[in-house]
Image (tube, rainbow, N blue to C red):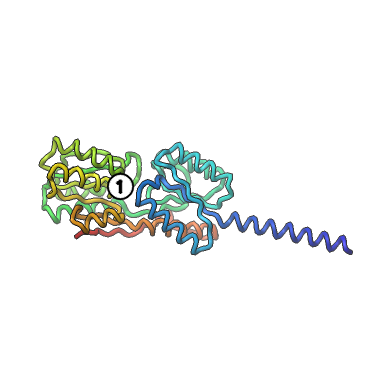
Amino acid sequence: MNMKKLATLVSAVVLSSTVSASAMAKDTMALVVSTLNNPFFVTLKDGAETKAKALGYDLLVLDSQNDPAKELANVEDLTVRGVKVLLINPTDSDAVGNAIAIANKAKLPVLTLDRGANKGTVVSHIASDNIAGGKMAGDFIAQKLGEKAKIIQLEGIAGTSAARDRGAGFKQAADAHGFQMLASQPADFDRTKGLNVMENLLSGHGDVQAVFAQNDEMALGAVRALQAAGKDKVLVVGFDGTDDGVKAVQKGKMAATVAQQSDQIGAIGVETADKVLKGETVPASIPVPLKVVSE
């Protein structure tokens, strides 16, 4: 009798520990961010962390430092750490396919944030409509300067869906308004590179009237280069709506920023991942609204 009770007790303990272990594992989501050296992605992370806490999940955050090899290592690491779902903000829309393939093989559901993936199985993509945003930037410049304005564009990291789509949307507006595109060069979504590229382009294109930078970091770099060259009247339009970008608009240093709600991208990503884990069907693509912030 006592042995029977003991056996029942042991099996109950084993069962409860198994249940609690699986519950603990179920409680962990992973977020792999392209870089935490960019305020936009820090805000995205913050939004994800706040929502994860509210829904009762632990969120494991890893920084890929804009390096596809680091991104791959991060995802490999996660496959053995008992996480239940992967939220990934790709360093590069092509290169991330290798990391997603590893997650797919490990039966880990994948959701992409802000930037899409060109390969691999992704349950849902949560991002702003970057094409619409690029067009909004171009339409804003036309509203301020009229048709045929002389423009320089600072592009993001080649190979990212965000850079490609923002550029495509801006081209729609540029074609519609007859903009004279003086130059369009990558500055990799980076403030220092934005400054350096802008300095170089100004030497050959001093007649520029407006700059469209595909993110606020590059826009802020461009502003510094323009100030140093005494060209304060050049219109600068950024993209993202980061705190620094919005402050620059309020101070009159930038004309506008196409504001993404990066905290919402993170929060909606976690909400969607929660639904996936509960077996609910989710949309393949979830757009997050944009707005132009200007003086």
Regarding residue 243, the answer to whether it shows in the image is: yes
Residue drawn 19% across the image and 46% down it? 211
Q: Could you say which is closer to the camera, residue 274 or residue 82?
A: 82
Residue furthest toward the right? 1
The residue indicated by pointer 1 is 165
Q: Is residue 193 above or below residue 23?
A: above
Q: Please state the horizontal and vertical placement of residue 46, each as a whole percent of the image.
A: 42, 56
**5 relative to 23 in the view: left or right:** right
Q: Quadrant of the N terminus?
A: bottom right
Q: Could you say which is closer to the camera, residue 160 or residue 43?
A: 43
Residue drawn 50% across the image and 50% down it? 86
Local SS, label 1: helix
Q: Amino acid at mark 1?
A: Asp
Q: Please state the horizontal and vertical placement of residue 5, each as a whole percent of the image.
A: 84, 63
**125 relative to 148 in the view: left or right:** right
Q: Please state the horizontal and vertical placement of residue 191, each as a whole percent of the image.
A: 28, 44
Residue 265: name its quadrant. Answer: bottom left
Residue drawn 25% across the image and 54% down it? 257
Total labels: the figure holds 1
Residue 96: name its quadrant. Answer: top left
Q: Quadrant of the C terminus?
A: bottom left
Residue furthest toward the front? 228
**64 relative to 25 in the view: left or right:** left
Q: Residues within 10 Å of mark 1 (few under 14, many from 20)?
A: many
Q: Please state the horizontal and vertical placement of residue 241, each as a whole percent of the image.
A: 29, 55
Regarding residue 139, the answer to whether it shows in the image is: no
Residue drawn 22% across the image and 52% down it? 137
